[in-house]
Image (tube, grey):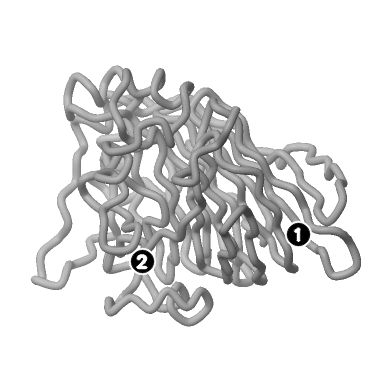
């Protein structure tokens, strides 16, 4: 197949969120340069109406409506032919604890919210000593017992607290009560959704001095109330090729994520080709490099996200970097 010269990779500019629990590391460590403080989330690759990434000055969703073939055949099947991303990629800086929350599955979210549910994957980029996350319950709960714990302020005693370390990986299925703890810097790959039901928010006040909204009734509708085994880190195997090594981090019906270790200092360029099934998003979380192709020379740095259309031209990567390669 002859590849169109329009199928070139391009950099994305993220949408930014200033939620009250954020810090400043997305600017300090990733050089995103957003004029927000606190800087909680960068939506690196998004067509969600609550925060679209930009390609130059053009919203990514608008660009994909002009070129739906860039999504790939499988992605268009996933979205029922709509020219939108099935996923959303974020960087998250939790200076403070996030609320204890839960996300609905697709059926509930589509019927109640008019958008997809939210299963998600977290890859830990940094964790300060003692950092934790919340994952499910330590013992079986019932709706009545959970409501009582919320009323008395005792909810946290029933939650699983999991130590978090750099390079950890967690898959958070829709329905799992969870929270990212203070001191975690995380790359999140999730369904294309912004539906969150808060159970508990530590009685914090927002910028206007008001408590943030809770969503107890809907959370009870969707939450898994049985005790949850502490998640175990999966076995990961590095596969080596000329100029790079890669390992599969997660594969589910919504997305696939590989971690790519690029090092071409003493080797040939690393080859990279997309198929017709899916676009690829390359999120650089360490180092820097250059993408080469026919009439293409695209430098990338830590904190950059590169969109590579489906069925793109053959590309070569050069540099020393760690990338998350996300596809559907």
Q: Residue at x 56, y 52 (%)?
A: 282
Please state which of residues 40 and 264 is positioned toward the viewer in this rendering.
Answer: 264
C-alpha distance separating marks 2 and 1: 28 Å
In x, y percent, where is residue 31? Answer: 47, 78
Specify few, some or many for label 2: CA neighbours under 10 Å numbering under 14, 14-19, or 20 or more: many
Residue 166 vs 161, above or below: the answer is below
In x, y percent, where is residue 251? Answer: 61, 30
Residue 229 vs 300, above or below: the answer is above
How many discs mark residues in the rendered view? 2
Kindly report which numbered mark, 2 or 1, lies closer to the viewer in this rendering. Answer: 1
Specify few, some or many for label 1: CA neighbours under 10 Å numbering under 14, 14-19, or 20 or more: many
Residue 70 vs 225, above or below: the answer is below
Q: Residue at x 29, y 49 (%)?
A: 200
Q: Are marks 2 and 1 in contact (CB under 8 Å)?
A: no
Locate residue 19: give its quadrant: bottom left
Residue 196 seen: no
Residue 182 vs 270, above or below: the answer is below
- Quick check: 188 left or right of 39? right
Locate residue 198: give its quadrant: top left
Please state which of residues 317 and 167 is positioned toward the viewer in this rendering.
Answer: 317
Residue 120 seen: yes
- Quick check: 169 left or right of 116? right
Q: Earlier in the sequence, mark 2 or mark 1?
A: 2
Q: Residue at x 61, y 53 (%)?
A: 294
Residue 117 is marked as none
Q: Which residue is mark 1?
A: 262
Q: Secondary structure at mark 1?
A: strand
Q: Which residue is mark 2?
A: 40
- Quick check: 80 left or right of 5? left
């Amino acid at each position: 197949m002859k590849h169109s010269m329009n199928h070139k990779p391009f950099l994305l500019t993220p949408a930014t969120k200033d939620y009250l629990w954020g810090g400043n590391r997305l600017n300090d460590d990733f050089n995103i340069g957003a004029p927000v403080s606190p800087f909680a989330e960068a939506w690196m690759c998004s067509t969600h109406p609550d925060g679209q990434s930009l390609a130059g000055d053009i919203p990514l969703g608008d660009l994909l409506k002009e070129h739906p073939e860039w999504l790939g055949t499988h992605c268009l099947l996933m979205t029922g032919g709509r020219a939108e991303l099935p996923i959303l990629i974020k960087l998250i800086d939790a200076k403070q604890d996030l609320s204890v929350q839960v996300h609905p599955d697709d059926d509930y979210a589509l019927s109640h919210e008019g958008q997809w549910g939210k299963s998600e994957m977290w890859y830990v980029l940094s964790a300060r000593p003692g950092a934790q996350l919340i994952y499910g319950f330590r013992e079986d709960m019932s709706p009545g017992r959970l409501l009582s714990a919320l009323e008395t302020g005792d909810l946290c005693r029933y939650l699983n607290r999991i130590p978090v370390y750099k390079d950890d990986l967690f898959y958070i299925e829709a329905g799992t009560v969870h929270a990212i703890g203070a001191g975690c810097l995380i790359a999140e790959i999730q369904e294309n959704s912004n539906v969150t039901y808060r159970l508990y928010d530590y009685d914090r006040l927002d910028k206007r001095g008001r408590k943030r909204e809770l969503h107890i009734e809907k959370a009870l509708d969707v939450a898994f109330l049985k005790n949850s085994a502490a998640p175990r880190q999966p076995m990961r195997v590095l596969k080596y090729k000329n100029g790079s090594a890669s390992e599969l981090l997660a594969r589910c019906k919504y997305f696939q994520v590989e971690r790519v270790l690029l090092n071409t200092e003493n080797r040939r360029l690393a080859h990279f080709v997309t198929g017709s099934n899916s676009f690829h998003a390359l999120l650089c979380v360490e180092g820097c490099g250059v993408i080469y192709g026919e009439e293409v020379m695209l430098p990338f740095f830590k904190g950059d996200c590169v969109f590579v259309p489906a069925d793109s031209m053959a590309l070569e990567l050069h540099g020393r970097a760690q990338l998350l390669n996300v596809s559907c």
